[in-house]
Image (cartoon, rainbow, N blue to C red):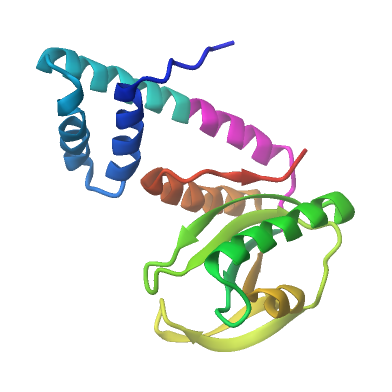
């Protein structure tokens, strides 16, 4: 079993700078990490070697996590790709996160739901929402067609929404997954986002 590297001020500074630099273009990331670590190293060669080793460690860990994730994906037949967004009249950002995850946990234990997802901020209005793929053996609420306007695509659209989640949180979007290839595409979208922000995947038990 691989042991975790010791926590040092240099490694803490690297982790923070690495996460923050992911939103930058690839060519600028190394320079930002280097700038953050300058005060912690007297020798430049030692600093550059440390950054190289830590960056390689992060990449190895990312590969291992992705392999494990795809193994989990292949163990299930996924039903829906879902997005959940909160309404200001129902929740704050923090209460939304807490209430939605509690809801998922109860559905996992009582209804057999399984999910893999992540939090994301919308590029248009910086509003927090949750994207995930779900196994839903027993649906709650009703799925209804809703005609509205997409601010992202600037056109009218028909979406499938869930009455239970809409009433409790604000808005929900349920897209049926018909083929396993669609699952991989949706998973790549989630992974692409969290790799930029340093976010974490959220899993149901089992």
Quadrant occupied by the C terminus: top right
Q: Nearer the viewer, residue 3 or 43?
A: 43
Q: Nearer the viewer, residue 108 or 17?
A: 17
Residue bounds of the magenta highlight: 63-79
Query: Residue placed at 48% from the left, 53% from the top?
Result: 189
User: Residue 57: x percent and y percent?
Assistant: 38, 21
User: Residue 177: x percent and y percent?
Assistant: 67, 59
Whether residue 182 appears in this view of the structure is yes
Query: Residue placed at 17% from the left, 30% from the top?
Result: 34
Tag count: 0
Q: Quadrant of residue 138?
A: bottom right
85 with respect to 39 (left or right): right
Q: Nearer the viewer, residue 86 or 132?
A: 86
Query: Residue placed at 37% from the left, 73% from the top?
Result: 124
Query: Residue placed at 39% from the left, 84% from the top?
Result: 154
Whether residue 177 appears in this view of the structure is no
User: Residue 123: x percent and y percent?
Assistant: 37, 67
Vertical comparison of 6 with 30: above or below: above
Vertical comparison of 90 with 194: above or below: below
39 with respect to 156 (left or right): left
């Amino acid at each position: 079993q691989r042991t975790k590297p010791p926590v040092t001020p240099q490694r803490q500074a690297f982790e923070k700078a690495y996460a923050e630099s992911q939103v930058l273009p690839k060519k600028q990331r190394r320079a930002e990490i280097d700038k953050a670590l300058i005060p912690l190293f007297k020798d430049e060669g030692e600093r550059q070697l440390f950054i190289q080793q830590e960056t390689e460690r992060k990449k190895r860990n990312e590969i291992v996590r992705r392999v494990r994730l795809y193994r989990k994906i292949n163990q299930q037949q996924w039903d829906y790709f879902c997005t959940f967004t909160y309404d200001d009249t129902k929740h704050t950002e923090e209460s939304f996160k807490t209430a939605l995850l509690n809801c998922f946990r109860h559905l996992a234990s009582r209804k057999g739901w399984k999910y893999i997802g992540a939090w994301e901020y919308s590029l248009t209005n910086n509003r927090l929402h949750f994207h995930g793929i779900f196994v839903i053996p027993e649906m709650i609420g009703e799925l209804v067609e809703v005609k509205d306007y997409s601010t992202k695509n600037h056109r009218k659209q028909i979406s499938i929404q869930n009455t239970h989640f809409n009433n409790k949180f604000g808005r929900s979007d349920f897209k049926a997954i018909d083929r396993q290839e669609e699952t991989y595409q949706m998973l790549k979208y989630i992974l692409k986002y969290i790799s930029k922000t340093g976010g974490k995947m959220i899993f149901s038990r089992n």
